Structures are given as C-alpha cells and as structure tokens.
Amino acid sequence: MIKRRKTTAVTAGTVKIGAKYPIAIQSMTKLATTDIAGCVRQINALAAAGAKLVRLAIPTRQDSIAFAKIVQKVKTPLIADIHFSAERAIEAIEAGAAKIRLNPGNIKDKNDINRIIDCAKTHKIAVRIGINEASIRNLLRDTPYRQRTNLMIKEMQSYVRLFEKRGLNNIVLSVKSSDVERTIESNCAIAEKFDYPIHLGLTHTGLAEDAIIPASVALGTLLQKGIGDTIRISIAGDPIQEVEIAKQILVSLGLYKSSQPQLIVCPTCGRVQWDLIGFARKVKKLLKDIKKPIRVAVMGCVVNGPGEAADADIAVCAAADRGFIYKKGKKISVVKQSKLFVALKTEIKKIG
C-alpha cells in the first residue's frame, strides 16, 4: 500500500485536498469561457466522468463576467486559471471561484500579489501557485537545461514566502514541465521543502494517444512515492479523456476505487488456438453496461489461465474446441467454444 506524504489540508469549495483525503482528479474546459452554455455542459460532463474540480481560462474581463454566471449554474467547484492580470484574479475570486491558479512566471509585482492574497483571504478560497518551466525562463539568457529544476524551486520559495508572510496558508503547489524526468525531479524537491498539498501534471503531453505513456510514467512515479494530492492530465483533445486517463493511473496504483469493471486479457502467443482478441473486444463492449467493479479475465491457454481465473470474479480460458468458465477461481462449466461468449454473458449479467 502506498503511504502518502503528510500535508496540510486545503479547502476548495466542497473539495478537501491533502494527504487525509482522496486524490482529487481535475480537468479544464476546452471552450472559450464566454461560451457559457458550452462550458456548463462540459463541466457537468467532466463531473459525471469523475472530475472533482474543473478549471477555466480567464484571460479577459468578458471571461470574468461569463465565469460569474457559470459558477451559478454548476455544482462542481471551479478554478480560475489566471495569467498576467491581478484584476482577473480578483474578479474571479469575487465571482465565486473555489480556487485560483496563479503563475509566478507572469504575475511578479508584489503589490499585485498582495492584493490577490488579501482578496483570497477575505473570500476564504484556495490558491494554487503553479509554476510552469516554460513561463519562468528568460529566453534572452536562457537557463541551461539541467539547472531549470533549481530555477523552478527558487521561484516557488520566493512566492510561498510572500503568501506565508501575508498569512495565507490555504495553498496548493505545482511545478510542471513537458519533460518527464524534470517533472519527477522538481516535484520530489518541493515535496522535501514544503508540506503543502501538491498538484501533479505535465504541462503538455500531446494528443490523447501520445499522452498516456509520459503522463503515466511521470505521475505514476510520483504517486508511488506518495507525492501528489490532486492531478490533471493535460492532453490536446477531449477533456473527458483527461479524467479517464487520470482514473486509470490512480486505479492501477490502488489510489482510486472504481465502480467500473476491469478486463484482464492474455497478451497471446503461439499457444493460443482461438480468436482471443476478437472475443475480448466483444467482452469489453459487454462490460460497458456493467456498473460494478468486477474483474473479468480472458485467457488464452492453461499457462496463466487458472491462476488469473483465481483472482477474477469471472474468467474464461479456451482451447481449440472447448471453453472453460470460472467463477471466483472455481470451474463452473465447460462449453463449446462457439457458445462461450453467450455462456460468459449469462454469468456476467448475474453479477452486474
């Protein structure tokens, strides 16, 4: 079992963030915030998929006005993503943001920062200090590749001191890069220096099909170390996929209790004498209608079949002409391979 690092507790609307609470999955709307109806639909869809927090971009005054209306139309706590403008931060807080994200790379004036802190304290909201490697670099005299982690930590320490001096401790920290190794390194560093909750993510992971591996490696490594209290998978695509990938990572580490079935499938080899892949795809489609966390195994031969069957609620293993169905590790029937799917479907329906 993974032992999470001890942190302070942060409140963002109805969501608690910290080591004592479940890791909160979040995502971000992919529409202009001024598209109020579209954003409301997307927020509700994200919440239904499992997102506990949703972030919206607030680049203009019109976005602030729209954000205030969106807050009133959804139950999910909303985060305002703020860059460059203290005015946008204050407008978002006053509009009802449960949390705002500030980027030390583009809000540097201490007077502006203090104004935001004071407003956040008055409204009792959370603030994420979110450092992106790309936004703090001075491209005219760029920081060498291997020194950028130190640069991010230095920026974080400076910003956190301002918040602590002003008496605001309801903060979450994040240091992000598009580089997997540097993301791991920098998050380990802030985990050693601070006891505030940490938001995990890569700044850019690419298209959905390309995002799964880097996100899983970076976030999975950190989560296994006990680091991370809220996560967002950043992909160029449907935000629902961000939530689905995040859930898969957490489920694989035992950090998320899923209500969805799990399908285990043999990788196949020369011993397989039937269309296991086609059969497994039919089973996966069948499981979409099941709303219980059952484990189903589809195995190709007797090497691992019985062992996987012992760990599954329902399992099948087939030879050239026969199929075997197991329930909780016990063989319950032997059928012709041509009738195996129908027999399996019947047993799954009894559970689901």
Image (tube, rainbow, N blue to C red):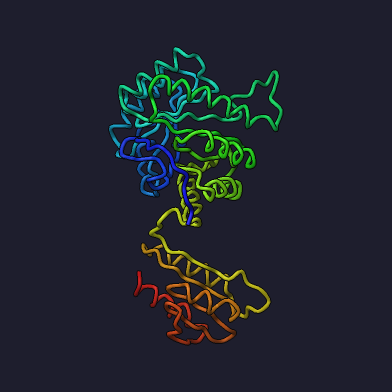
Residue 257 vertical position relative to residue 156 in the rendered view, above or below: below
Q: Residue furthest top?
A: 111
What residue is at 65 percent from the left and 30 percent from the top? Answer: 148
Q: Quadrant of the C terminus?
A: bottom left
The residue drawn where x is 53% and y is 76% is 307
User: Where 61 sits versus 264, above or below?
Assistant: above
Name the residue nearer the viewer: 39 or 309.
309
Q: How far from the left and from the top, in percent, is residue 44?
A: 35, 43
**Residue 231, percent across and down?**
47, 42
- Please give the count of numbered marks on the rendered protein: 0
In this view, 301 is above or below 103: below
Nearer to the camera, 318 or 138: 138
Q: In terms of depth relative to the viewer, which is nearer, 45 or 105?
A: 105
Which residue is farthest left?
Answer: 72
Residue 282: % across, % down: 49, 69
State the image quarter where residue 88 is shown.
Answer: top left
Residue 156 drawn at (x, y percent): 53, 27
**Residue at point 36% right, 28% down?**
67
